[in-house]
Image (cartoon, coloured by chain):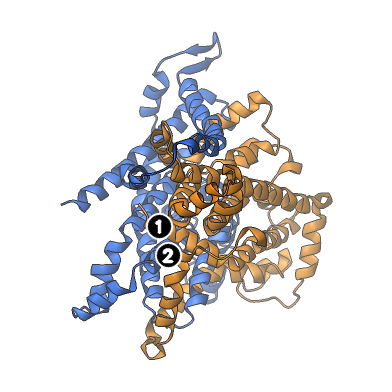
Amino acid sequence: MTVTTPSTAEGRSRPGRPRRHRSAGPLFVAPFLVLFVLLFLAPLGYAAYLSLFQTRLIGGTVFVGLDNYVQAFGDSQFLHGVGRVALFFVVQVPVMLLLALLFALALDSGLLRLSRVIRLGIFVPYAVPSVVAALMWGYLYGPDFGPFAQLSRNLDLPVPAFLSEGWMLGSLANIVTWEFVGYNMIILYAALRTVPQELYEAAAMDGAGAWRIAWSVKLPALRPALLLTLLFSVIGSFQLFNEPNLLMKIAPDVISSSYTANLYAYSLAFTGQQVNYAATVSFLLGLVIVIASYGVLLTANRRRTP
Amino acid sequence: MTTTMPAPPVTRTAKKPARLTHRGKNPARRSTPLTIAMLAALAYFLLPLFWLLVASTKSTQDLFNSFGLWFSDAPQLLTNIKETFTQDDGVFARWLLNTALYAGVSAVGAALLAAAAGYGFAKFRFRGDGAAFNLVLGAVMVPTTALAIPTYLLFAQAGLANTPWAIILPSLVNPFGLYLMRVYAADSVPDSILEAARIDGAGEARIFFRIALRLMAPGVVTVLLFTLVATWNNYFLPLIMLNDPDLYPITVGLASWAAQAQNGGAGASSDMLALVVTGSLISIVPLVVAFLMLQRYWQSGLAAGGVKQ
């Protein structure tokens, strides 16, 4: 996390803050921190605590140490769930971020007509709840009244099986991409807008063309913003829940209750009544995300200082 | 609302208009092929919304019997809207109100908390400030859904599950919002103004509410809007926390209707499908309008978050 905090150093180096105002700082920070401890740290600690117990038919709730963790590492449903979201992450996120980057560069190039309309139109899906997005796409994918199926039938082509086992992960990836390309595009576009114009002018004076400027000036300037979008994508992908949970109702044979790790934790807690094991799975999923996020940050840092 | 958001800080606006005119005043450089390619991309993003609009005008029968991407012979948008609002004794309006309440309270609360804390971290030094800030920042990585199950168990013990607080309280803490507000406060609130206000004898609270908060307005609006969207669109947390349909937000309500429509198929509860579709359309209108109206604020706010590291 260190890369994202240099502003701390900046705060430190600023001298000359009078002593007598020191007491006000903690007061501004306190309400947030109190709620943070109650609503972030306490549930985390509680999950860690719960994960050390098991409720048995005979003997009630007993302390079992790390038994739940041992069980999870041998639990093929959990491992498959994590594997599926990892695959989802590896395929969907690069596609989404590449599209977002291309759109942001196109908008920033000043070559577009109707750029305002295009920018807002691409962003609009972000304001659509993922529940509605999943419902809409679910109906669009559908074999009965989905327009793709209708068109295929009219043209005597085979109806595309968007909701079949082989296509489902791709269909989910399409929904998530649709929802979040615009959001990522706006973050990247906003970052591009703050690049000083003089930098482009200097590069143009040195004889750089549009592509060269994009590659050598704009992309490096986008590094922090790209890292931010990548981190958000790690967090989002690994907790995939809403879209599979809704498509599950349309395609129950394809999406099981352990299709993603998060779906598994949910069904353990609320249909299986296995609260302790659900806490273990949640906790492990959180750990997977933290490790993946650190991996992303470390890779980015290593590349920055060759 | 309008009183709390005056013009964005000077440092930001100063370079922007110059660049906008610079780029805007060169029609000869416009590229038609690029525009066409982007319009094609735009079509992909708008297609499902167009489908939703068309589908909202149809009866469940017409959904099956007419082509999905065009209107049927007997459009009945108003009938659908009326039926959406009268189904189950008007529970849909209740869901809308719940959603507005949860999202509104969460957004205002989260934005104020993050603004105060971000300002505190940016403009004051105190024991442990660095450690506390890094702890909160690290929490950005903790998945909210992994937190949701233990939070539910704690809330159930405290008697808060199945109450509006179960949705509002967890939405009040926004670590990314704090990060954004800290960057924003450091950037947009000059120390000299604070010093001047102190010399004039203003108290710290007064300085924050009367001066700092206004200077930070675009950042505050950004956090406000994004918390609003996050809470408005939240599904996992209310799904876990609530079991009384009268407390559902729109997302959980629509999902429950969709499940009914699915189970009923095209037969018994056949009208449900049209209601799900129309309800979906109604549920996205407020947010889309909010985003379009407030776009210049959230964009400048995001610029701060995406650039500073």
Query: Which residue is more in the foreground, B223 or B65?
Result: B223
Q: In this view, does A62 lie above or below B22?
A: above
Percent of width and height locating residue B159: 69, 26
Q: Which residue lies furthest to the left in this view?
A: A306
Q: Which chain is orange?
A: B
Please give the residue where the numbered disc 1 appears in the rendered image.
B306
Percent of width and height locating residue B165: 67, 37
Q: Residues within 10 Å of mark 2 (few under 14, many from 20)?
A: many
Total labels drawn: 2
Residue A54 visible from this viewpoint: yes
Marks 1 and 2, how far apart at CA: 7 Å
Look at 48% across and 17% down and name the residue there: A53
Q: Which residue lies furthest to the top in this view?
A: A59
Which quadrant would residue A101 be assigned to in this image? bottom left
Q: Is residue B278 left or right of residue A158?
A: right
Look at 50% across and 11% down and name the residue there: A62
Query: Which residue is more in the foreground, B55 or A42?
Result: A42
Q: Residue furthest bottom?
A: B28
The circle on residue A227 is: none
Query: Which residue is more in the foreground, B44 or A206?
Result: A206
Percent of width and height locating residue A291: 33, 38
Confirm or deny contact between disc 1 and disc 2 (CB under 8 A): yes
Q: Is mark 2 on a helix, strand or loop?
A: helix
Color used for chain A? blue
The circle on residue A190 is: 2
> Dot 1 falls on which chain?
B
Amino acid type of the residue that numbered disc 2 sits on in the rendered structure: Ala
Quadrant location of the N terminus of chain B?
A: bottom right
Look at 38% across and 53% down and name the residue there: A228
Q: What element carries label 1?
A: helix
Co-location on one chain, circles 1 and 2: no
Amino acid type of the residue that numbered disc 1 sits on in the rendered structure: Gly
